[in-house]
Amino acid sequence: MRQYGPIPRNDNMYDEHIRKSAKRAGVRPLAFVHPVEQEVLAQFRPEHTDCRSVILTGTAGDGKSHLCGKIWSVLGGSEEQWNSDDVYHTLEIASDQGTMTVHVIRDLTALPPHDTRSRYSHKAELLTRFCDCLCVPDGKVQFLIAANDGQLVETLQRLPTTDNVARVRAIVESLLVEGRRESAEAPLTLFNLSRVPCVTLFDLALDAFLEHEGWAECYASKVADGFFGDRCPIRHNYELLKSPLVRDRLRSLFELCDCNELHVPIRRMLLLFANAILGHADAKDRLMQAADVSTFLQKNTTAKASLFNNLFGGNLSEVRRDSLEVFDYLNRFRIGHETSNRVDNILIFGEADENLKPYFDALLRADTMYGADDSYYAAQRSYVEGDDADPANDHFLRMLVSQRRGLFFKIPPEWEQELSLWELTVFKFAGEYLEKVLKPLKNGGRVERPFLARLVKGLNRIFVGMLVSSDRDLLLATSISFSSSKVSQVLEDRVPVTPRLNERVELAWLNGKPTLHVQFSQTISASLPLNLTRYEFLSRVAEGALPGSFSRECYEDMLAFKSRLLSCLNERRRSEGVTESNTVAFHLLTLDPAGNPLDDVVEVTHG
């Protein structure tokens, strides 16, 4: 399992290294059926009459090499040949049309400039041959190429330009940008593995990890005061990761990563699980081995193996943690660093306060492994009774980070609202986004009106630049000078939230994403993908936060959306035949004491 973890040798970077290590140890490597595996394999089955070349692309660790190996095996290729260091293989396959040559490049970046076996004279010559077979197909040649998406485009750009090369470049770039798999212009299927949702990979990878038969061997080999005994942190972390509550909370974080368009490849998923189980700040490579357990039990340092801390890379050095995108993405939630007064009161004063004691006992005292132990109580007393400048306080504050992380995974569902679970993250509306927006839209339902109304209120405050309270209409306002002015008091139009004729504002599921959709007429509309960050931003602005204080990027996104809405409004006016007259009427916005918008009509006549 350590081979999958964040070890310095980076053996987990390559599927072939993992398989070799597993073979030496006599252990089956982790495996599951990739979500696109059957579709990819179908391209190479004898009954598949449409001979199409295949490109597997995505980020490093998405499973490209593993899928190539599966295809090679299905085609009848030699395992010994595949396990060699060669990244280019060819195979002659008998088909109804005769003999077909399948070219497999399992790592385009590692493809040598010149082939020592004289199968190609130069890398560019082989790839030009690939472009030619796509543009002038003869049904006798099929390519399978695995490449990271950026490297794929860069490699094609460096090829000497011919008509066929230029055509394939355009096709590949179009497929990548538009998220399509096939083009009618060439017999090519492109599978972008980075488009597989994180939460789908999470479910498959975690099941494969937790259900591996090796865990049964660990239980059978347990040592009373050591590995897999009752107090073993490796065993405890494994059992915690299996628990429905911990799994569901971790799954929610990956679902939110999807919502923010952050992709975590399979390799990093497995690295996270391995680190969660084996992490310990004092172990070699910061990952425990079986022999370490008895030592850490004797030293009473098992708290440093906390799964809750390991899930965020708390056991790793800062440099190592920051170099791994899975920890970068999870730490963007700021779990452990965000909190509420109620949560910190439980952590600091819960033992002595009879109102808070039930929470303290259930969440900290009952956790004999990673909850309130002797060192925690000592640091807590020193913090409460000591001097603010006492250096020991820094130690307790670090403990609080770990305990807040633990609470995120330990607070039961019935206490989520009471203890404001999601205030332990930087996205306090994340739980609402998952349950009240994402879930109903995915299931074909509608979002309840109060949640849409709050978003409209937030948009109105940004569009107008004043503390508007209205949420029944979307207010499209400009200034005299330009539409992106911070304060816009010239009302151009109101788009009702409740449908009226062909006008409406709604939350819809478009292109696989929650989307804020504004309809002006049957044919004129504008949409804004509503990721988690934008939802949080609009919700906070509706509650009174200044737009620029939370996210300058989101603020600029909203102003750009406003410009698109104003363009749609002008398009509708043109389609309705609205023409200018000698008299121009301005609707000047003002607010009453409750923040409701009022508009006064000012008419200007010009010659």
Image (cartoon, rainbow, N blue to C red):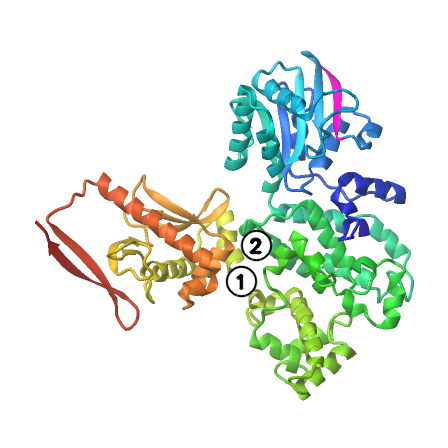
Q: Residue at 41% of width from left, 55% of height from top?
A: 556
Q: Residue 461 location, x and y as percent?
A: 35, 62
Read off the magenta span: 87-94
Checking the image for residue 401, the label placed there is: none
Q: Is residue 511 located in the magenta-colored stretch of the structure?
A: no
Q: Secondary structure at mark 2?
A: helix
Q: Is residue 410 left or right of residue 432?
A: right
Residue 309 appears in the figure: yes
Instruction: Kindly indicate the quadrant of the structure image that contains residue 524.
Output: top left
Q: Nearer the viewer, residue 48 or 599?
A: 599
Q: Is residue 274 left or right of residue 465?
A: right
From the image, give the main secondary structure of the stretch colored magenta. strand
Q: Is residue 88 located in the magenta-colored stretch of the structure?
A: yes
Q: Is residue 273 left or right of residue 452?
A: right
Q: Residue 374 location, x and y as percent?
A: 78, 79
Q: Residue 503 location, x and y as percent?
A: 30, 48
Instruction: Kindly indicate the quadrant of the structure image that contains residue 522.
Output: top left
Q: Amino acid at mark 1?
A: Phe
| Disc 2: which residue | 256
Q: Amino acid at mark 2?
A: Leu
Q: Secondary structure at mark 1?
A: loop
Q: Residue at 63% of width from left, 24% of height from top?
A: 53
| Disc 1: which residue | 427
**Tag 1–tag 2 contact (CB < 8 Å):** yes
Residue 206 appears in the figure: no
| Within-10-Å neighbours for mark 2: few <14, some 14–19, many 20+ | many
Q: Residue furthest left?
A: 607
Among numbered discs 1 and 2, the one appearing first in the sequence:
2
Q: Residue at 55% of width from left, 28% of height from top?
A: 169
Q: Residue 457 location, x and y as percent?
A: 37, 61
| Within-10-Å neighbours for mark 1: few <14, some 14–19, many 20+ | many
